[in-house]
Amino acid sequence: MDHKKNLLSGIVAGVLLLFLNNSIALSTIKSLFDSMPIAYITVRCMIYILSFIGILTIAFCSIELIIEVHKFRKQR
């Protein structure tokens, strides 16, 4: 994977985590689905799954960048 794509996907995952896990977003979701508890639970579950995917993406990008930097330093 290209370094710019790694960096971009890491930034997107980080922004997604910040957006989905702030108190304003969670209170908005709660007020929208207050009368429908099953829908609220489903939406919260989707947020947790997206957050988990975001964390994995950030970890993968970080590990891949560390490996590339290590390879670059070995070549020098």
Image (tube, grey):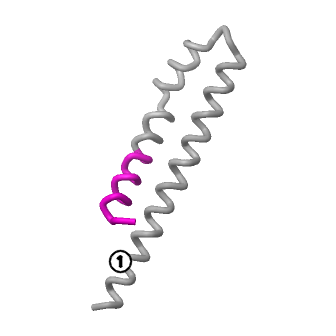
Q: Nearer the viewer, residue 71 or 1?
A: 1
Q: State the quadrant of the N terminus.
A: bottom left
Give residue 69's quadrant in the image: bottom left
Task: From the top left corner, tell me how far across and down residue 73 is, in percent.
Answer: 32, 86
Q: Residue at x 72, y 19 (%)?
A: 38
Residue 40, above or below 9 = above
Instruction: Report the quarter where the C terminus lies.
Output: bottom left
Q: What SS does tag 1 mark?
A: helix
Q: Position of residue 20 (x, y in %)?
A: 49, 34
In percent of the image, x 57 and y 34: which residue is there? 47
- Image side of residue 65 versus residue 38, left or right: left
Q: Position of residue 8 (x, y in %)?
A: 34, 53
Question: Is residue 4 found left or right of 18 in the rendered image?
Answer: left
Residue at the far top in the pictured view = 35
Disc 1 packing (10 Å; few <14; some 14–19; many ≥20)? few
Our reading of the magenta stretch's main secondary structure is helix
Q: Is residue 2 magenta?
A: yes
Residue at image location 55% in from the left, 41% down from the top: 50
- Identify residue for label 1: 69
Q: Is residue 12 left or right of residue 34?
A: left
Vertical position of residue 39 compared to residue 60: above or below? above
Vertical placement of residue 64 versus 15, above or below = below
> Picture coordinates of residue 61 (x, y %)?
44, 62
**Residue 65 falls in which quadrant of the image?**
bottom left
Kind of residue at badge 1: Val
Q: Which residue occupies the extreme front position in the image?
A: 1
Q: Which residues are magenta?
A: 1-14
- Magenta span includes 13: yes
